[in-house]
Image (cartoon, rainbow, N blue to C red):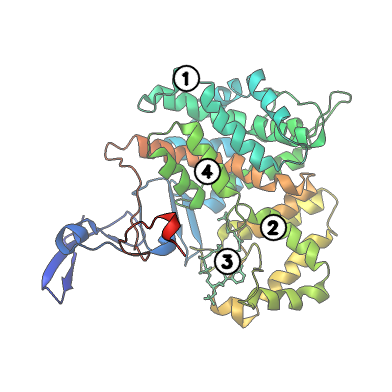
Amino acid sequence: MTDKKFELVDRATERKAQLPVRNGTIGPSVVDISALNKDLGVFTFDPGFGLTAATESRITYIDGDAGTLLYRGFPIEQLAEKSSFMECAYLLLLSELPSRKQLEEFTSNIRYHTMLNETLLRFFNGFHHNAHPMAMVSAVVASMSAFYHDTMDIYNPRHREIFAHRIIAKIPTIAAAAHKHSLGQPFVYPRNDLDYCSNMLHMLFAVPCEPYQVDPIASQALDLLFILHADHEQNASTSTVRLAGSTGANPYAAISAGVSALWGPAHGGANEAVLAMLEQIGTVDNIPKYLDMAKDKSSHFRLMGFGHRVYKNFDPRAKIIREMCHKVLARLGRSDNPLFELALRLEEIALKDEYFVSRKLYPNVDFYSGVIYSAIGIPRSMFTVMFAIARTVGWVAHWQEMISDPGMRIGRPRQLYTGATKRDYTEITKRS
Ligand code: CMC
């Protein structure tokens, strides 16, 4: 809290509300509006929560104008270059970078939980072969609530820790099982001698009838993508996890809600939509036609992978992924990837277009990630699932932060009601 205060005056009644200002460690201050309703009898109106800080948080910081992203204070560029997904998971969950011993212990705790209960594996048989993997993942994650009653006391820190290890360990196994079910192939059990991302690739691509060698380039690329996707402060899916969790719902239910929220094309579903869009555009000659469609307000078409609620300069993750595309495609011997070429041209043309420039619409994290996923053999329907695996770390960190806050309250937005005023019920026989 600072000494600074805003005073809001209702001119009709001369009633006043004093609104104190609270400072963060960096970034814009916020106005604490708790006196508004008590003193003036009004609420705020902020559709889409564009201006509302719903919580205090110490996990991730974004400066959208400067294109800055920090996990616990560390710039994403440094983490992408020097860290690993497991280390970032530790950092996001436990606030500090681990010592070598702490990291080994954390990683082995995660490894310990990679297998799924066989009963849970059988859930997949209830899905049709063409079920979207996100549908399976969200349902199976929610079903985990039915398996771990002994560690579900949300106010017990040790239970919360076991939950964190379990969900981070098992979500790749669930994701891979969803993929295998779609293919009609047998599930592949996790290999705990492999690192997190190599094991993920093994479960996705190995088959029992022949040996499978994990490609270290693919595994490193996946690890980097997971670092970039691990957290992004109060985005829609994280806010969903917080809202669901604020009711006291068990954490598997809350994470499942997050998976569902991530699925939409305005959020994590964009990576799948970008590839569909690039395939639809097909050639550079068609780009102007699709840009016109994106600008046409009567069309529902948007340039997928472009624009962001917070980044109004550039998305630092997109910059890292674009560079990574060049490197990964070259190392995989696929430098002449036509979809990547098309994406580069689309970006170039859009960034010279007044519509995109004036609205500060830049490529976001999802614009290029699908190109890499495709290059390492991951099918389009699995892109958002891959995002969900990485973001699980952020969801868990935010859920933990919220539950361990003694001041936690149920999340419950208000509304501006514009429906019918009070009226009397009419018997059905008397209605025209
Ligand atoms: N294509 C065409 N026009 C756009 C786009 C786009 N991709 N994004 C925003 N606009 C326009 C929008 O129509 C509006 O124009 P006007 O001022 O004339 O009404 C203006 O730009 C501001 O957009 P907005 O919809 O108010 O912005 P928002 O903050 O509500 O939405 C967004 C952000 C990411 C949902 C949106 O930019 C979008 O739909 N982008 C495409 C989907 C996408 O790539 N999503 C991934 C986001 S990053 C990863 C993640 O969060 O998971």
Q: Position of residue 284 (x, y in %)?
A: 81, 73
> Is residue 216 depicted above or below 231 in this figure?
above
Tell me which residue sits at (30%, 42%) in the image: 409
Between 18 and 211, the residue placed more toward the observer is 18
Disc on res. 258: 4
Does mark 2 have its CB less than 8 Å from ligand 1? yes
Tell me which residue sits at (43%, 45%) in the image: 72
Disc on res. 149: 1
| Residue placed under numbered mark 2 in the picture | 273
- Ranked by sequence position, the earlier of labels 1 and 4 is 1
User: From this viewpoint, is residue 50 visible?
Assistant: no
* Image-quadrant location for residue 280: bottom right
Amino acid carrying mark 3 in the image:
Gly
- Ranked by sequence position, the earlier of labels 2 and 4 is 4
- Ranked by sequence position, the earlier of labels 3 and 1 is 1
* Image-quadrant location for residue 168: top right
- Measured in 3D between alpha carbons, the distance from the residue under mark 3 to the one under mark 1, in whole angstroms, is 42 Å
- Ranked by sequence position, the earlier of labels 4 and 3 is 4
> Is residue 182 depicted above or below 12 in this figure?
above
- Measured in 3D between alpha carbons, the distance from the residue under mark 2 to the one under mark 1, in whole angstroms, is 38 Å
Q: Residues within 10 Å of mark 3 (few under 14, many from 20)?
A: many
- Give left or right: position of 406 versus 152: left
